[in-house]
DNA sequence: TCACGTCAAGCAGAT
DNA sequence: ATCTGCTTGACGTGA
């Protein structure tokens, strides 16, 4: 079981997701940003290893505008060695990596242009992981997408479109239950036809599910991950007090985290903490795992 | 130096 | 009809 957090580290003095406005695009600006982001990424990974954090989500703006027509620069060639170097660090330390393209990446959109743009965006994500030389346990997670007034049709469109994607994407793509439209059960139905692993989001499941217990949900999600996929990835978050349902809390609550771990026994998986204070909560979670005798076997 | 309007892009649900 | 949240806040103009 690894603990992770997404994209950003507040302790370090660097930002690994520096971008800029498209209006001020220039190749130099792009190179500068990528340089900064990769440099900071390595620093974050080194911080993580020092602190027993072995799961990390890469920012999607590592290469700003990578899939946009405005970007014509061959950044892959320019940064080939840097990517490889980071990849080697990742492999040496057995770090698990994930990426999560944003809400505009919709492969089940009825609009073909949106699909085409999403395809390009996914290619970019896959190429980043390929450039690092990572195997297919490094994943790209997306949601099913929109409902467009007909859920079953939209699920079928997802499946159809999945088969149109390049192999470098298909081998890394995993689908995640969301908080309002597609439940774990819906994702499993997609998995049955595509063999896409299902990433289980605990928080979304609490807001939108068919009522499966955490134990049962993990049990079924876990079976969709084959050896080449690595172990199940789980997104974990909790409700922010006083805010509307679905907003993410500022900080982890170790008591409820431990209660989740209890409910998830005896399964092993990697946990991504989608919590606002990032590494701070990850450090607490790692400590909880390492000091509580109920969980030391992980 | 700081405040704050806006940022490439889509969708759903809340207000 | 308009706003908010989501991947992740943060860019950058104007004062």
Image (cartoon, coloured by chain):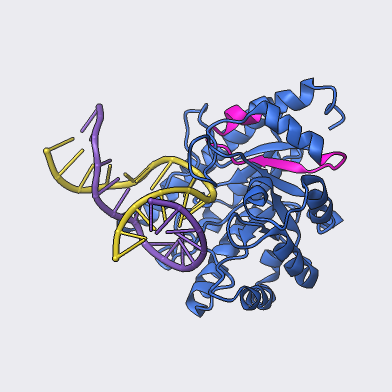
Chain colours: A blue, B purple, C yellow
Which residue, as the protein is rendered here, is positioned at the far top?
A291
In the image, what residue occupies the spot 83% across and 42% down? A268
- Pick the residue in front: A102 or A228: A102
Residue A8, percent from left and from top: 53, 38
Q: Indicate left or right for A150 with A210 as reference.
A: left
A266 part of magenta stretch = yes
The answer to whether one can see residue A159 in this image is yes
Residue A106, percent from left and from top: 55, 67
In the image, what residue occupies the spot 65% across and 54% down? A129
Residue A257, percent from left and from top: 70, 32
The answer to whether one can see residue A230 in this image is no
Of the 4 image quadrants, the one containing the C terminus of chain A is top right
- Pick the residue in front: A139 or A218: A218
Region rendered in magenta? A264-282
Residue A80, percent from left and from top: 59, 52
Q: Indicate left or right for A229 with A73 as reference.
A: right
């Amino acid at each position: 079981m690894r603990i992770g957090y997404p994209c950003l580290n507040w302790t370090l003095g660097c930002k690994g997701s520096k971008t800029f406005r498209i209006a001020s695009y220039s190749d130099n600006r792009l190179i500068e940003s990528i340089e900064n982001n990769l440099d900071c990424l390595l620093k974050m990974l080194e911080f993580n290893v020092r602190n027993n954090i072995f799961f990390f989500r890469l920012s999607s703006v590592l290469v700003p505008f990578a899939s946009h027509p405005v970007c014509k620069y061959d950044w892959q060639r320019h940064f080939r060695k840097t990517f490889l170097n980071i990849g080697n660090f990742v492999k040496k330390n057995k770090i698990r990596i994930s990426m999560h393209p944003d809400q505009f990446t919709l492969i089940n959109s009825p609009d073909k242009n949106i699909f085409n743009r999403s395809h390009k965006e996914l290619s970019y994500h896959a190429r980043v992981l390929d450039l690092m030389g990572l195997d297919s346990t490094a994943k790209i997670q997306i949601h099913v997408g929109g409902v467009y007034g007909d859920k079953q049709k939209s699920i079928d469109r997802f499946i159809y479109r999945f088969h149109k994607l390049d192999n470098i994407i298909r081998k890394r793509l995993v689908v995640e239950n969301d908080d309002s439209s597609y439940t774990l059960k819906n994702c499993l139905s997609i998995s049955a036809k595509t063999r896409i692993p299902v990433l289980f989001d605990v928080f979304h499941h609490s807001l939108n599910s068919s009522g499966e217990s955490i134990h049962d949900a993990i049990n079924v999600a876990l079976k969709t991950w084959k050896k080449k996929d690595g172990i199940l990835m789980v997104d974990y978050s909790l409700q922010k007090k006083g805010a509307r349902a679905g907003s993410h809390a500022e900080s982890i609550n170790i008591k409820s985290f431990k209660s989740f771990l209890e409910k998830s026994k005896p399964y092993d998986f990697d946990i991504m903490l989608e919590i606002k204070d990032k590494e701070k909560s990850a450090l607490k979670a790692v400590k909880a795992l390492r000091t509580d005798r109920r969980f030391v076997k992980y």
